[in-house]
Amino acid sequence: MKIYLDNCSYNRPFDNQLQMRIRLETQAKLYIQAGIREGKYSLCWSFMSDYENKENPSEENRKAISLWEPIADEYCETSSDIFERAKEYMKIGLKHKDALHLACAVKLDCDYLITTDKKFYNKNDFIKEIKIANPMTFILEMEEAK
């Protein structure tokens, strides 16, 4: 099972944990990362993951997130076809960075793109190449598949 986490997912544990939804997404994301370490899931990374992480204003968060790049099994380099595909995804209402993350995940033939961005995972009905899921939904689907 190949998965791609966008920057919203990586940053979720650093968000204010007062809201129950954020706490649950944090726990689900940490559970997924444990699954990656255990070899249940193959992690994919991209130039967009690098780019967005470098833009993170918190040095502590940047360092913690960057530790996941060497754990990734595959890496998506920048290419013209990624940008062309991202343009197509923007036509369905995705923001530029989200469209690029999605194009990278599709290029790497990932099964899931995991995000905590509600506007992003609500576009799942328009995307056929990959499943876009919230961390909690991903865990539920994996549990049901057992």
Image (cartoon, rainbow, N blue to C red):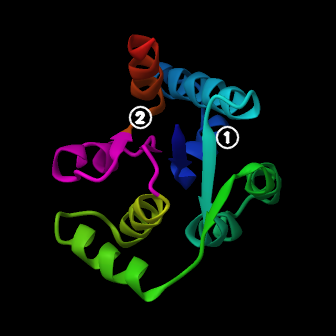
> Residue at position x 49%, y 24% from top?
19
The number of discs equals 2
Q: In which image quadrant can residue 136 be found?
A: top left
User: In terms of sequence position, does the residue under pointer 1 or pointer 2 come before the other?
Assistant: 1
Q: Which mark is residue 134?
A: 2
Q: Which mark is residue 14?
A: 1
Q: Which residues are magenta?
A: 109-132
Q: Secondary structure at mark 1?
A: helix
User: In what quadrant of the picture does the C terminus appear?
Assistant: top left
Q: Residue at 54% of width from left, 81% of height from top?
A: 78
Q: Between residues 109 and 113, which one lies in front from this camera angle?
A: 109
Label 1 is placed on what type of residue?
Phe
What distance separates the C-alpha of mark 1 from that of mark 2? 17 Å
- Secondary structure at numbered mark 2: loop
Position in image of residue 103 (x %, y %): 40, 67
Q: Residues within 10 Å of mark 2 (few under 14, many from 20)?
A: many
For the residue pair 1 and 30, the one nearer the viewer reads as: 1
Dots 1, 2 in contact, CB < 8 A: no
Is 116 part of what is drawn in magenta?
yes
Q: Quadrant of residue 9?
A: top right
- In this image, 19 relative to 63: left or right? left
Q: Is residue 29 left or right of residue 104?
A: right
Q: Residues within 10 Å of mark 1 (few under 14, many from 20)?
A: few
Is 93 placed above or below 51 here? Answer: above
Amino acid carrying label 2: it is Asn
Rendered position, 17 above or below 126: above
Looking at the image, which residue is at 52% across and 52% down?
6
Relative to 103, is 6 on the left or the right? right
Q: Mark 1 against mark 2, which lies toward the viewer?
A: 2
Expressed as whole percent of the image width and height from the top left, the position of residue 143 reads 46, 13
